[in-house]
Image: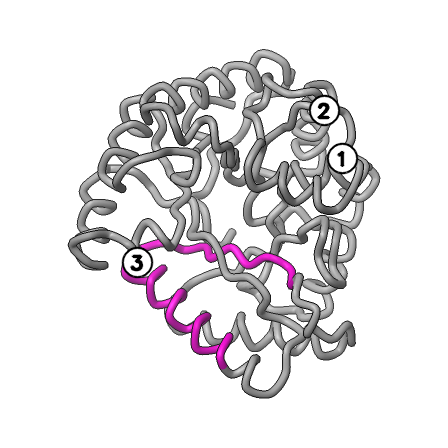
Amino acid sequence: MNLDHFGMDTRSLAGPLEAKLRAVRAAGFTQVMLHAADIAGHPEGELAAVRAVRTSGLRITGLQHLGDFEGLSGPLHAYKVDVAKAMVEMCYALECRVLVVSSSTSSRAAGDIGLLTQHLQQLAMLSVPLNVRIAYEPLSWGRHIRDIEQAADLVQDADRANLGLALDSFHWLAGGGDLGMLDAVDPEKLFLVQLSDFMWQEVRSERERIDTAQHLRAFPGEGAHSNELADLVRRLDEIGYRGDYSFEVFNDDYRQLPPPIVAQRARRAVKWVTDHVSRRSLPARRPAGESP
């Protein structure tokens, strides 16, 4: 395991897109996770943002994120389909092969498994022509799908080649950190792993969980769950995961610091993971989104 296996998220950084990309590259990373707002909100327009990404020399781990897609009906569902199409087209423009889709939190979302499966199939199928894969991420406060085991079952039921999973360690930790849940995961269907920690042992309410996830995450090695994170990465290796790791650290304090300082914290997190997770040499990894 080395630096090439890791990337970081632009949402961890303050400033314009170009400054974020420079900081990530200067810290030694070869890949970056993009947030759609960085592209759509570029002051010179989407084409300028795409040019900045393409000339950065960074591989795109994925694009974040489409939320509240599955389980809706009527005009709400039609609206979300239009949004999904636009985000898939953004992926294509960026030469990005993975779109991250989080489990629905909407109170309007039905819990019928057949409907959820049908909607994920629809999303996967509309992404096929542009060669984009869907990484479905269970949120620990999701309306109906809250953990990787439930998400894996849904993805298996949907049974589409370009539909897989994203595992976010924050949600895994906040949900109890049960390594046994990974037994339900086919490593070939795990498209992405997102790593982060937080500063206290437990979250005491759903509101605290959401606030922590969105505003006060920490890099691996900085938080209160170092042993659990090390165990998680070891277990992922044992089940055969050979994909990308992205640091998904949303922290309001970090966004008040110069991007190079935060990017160096991410670089130290790579060292922490590689120092604390004893792993055998890995075979060559395929780029994110590339089928085996």
At x 70% / y 41%, what residue is drawn?
A: 209
> Which residue is at the far top?
275
Q: Is residue 99 magenta?
A: yes
Q: Which residue is mark 1?
A: 203
Q: Earlier in the sequence, mark 3 or mark 1?
A: 3
For residue 40, which numbered disc appears in the image?
3
At x 71% / y 79%, what residue is drawn?
A: 115
Mark 1 residue type: Val
Mark 2 residue type: Trp
| Residue in the foreground of this view, choosing between 131 and 148 | 148
Our reading of the magenta stretch's main secondary structure is helix
Q: Which residues are magenta?
A: 79-104
At x 31% / y 55%, what residue is drawn?
A: 95
Mark 3 residue type: Ala
Relative to 200, does residue 58 appear above or below in the rendering?
Answer: below
At x 49% / y 79%, what residue is drawn?
A: 79
Q: Which residue is mark 2?
A: 200
- Where's residue 45, x and y in %? 19, 58
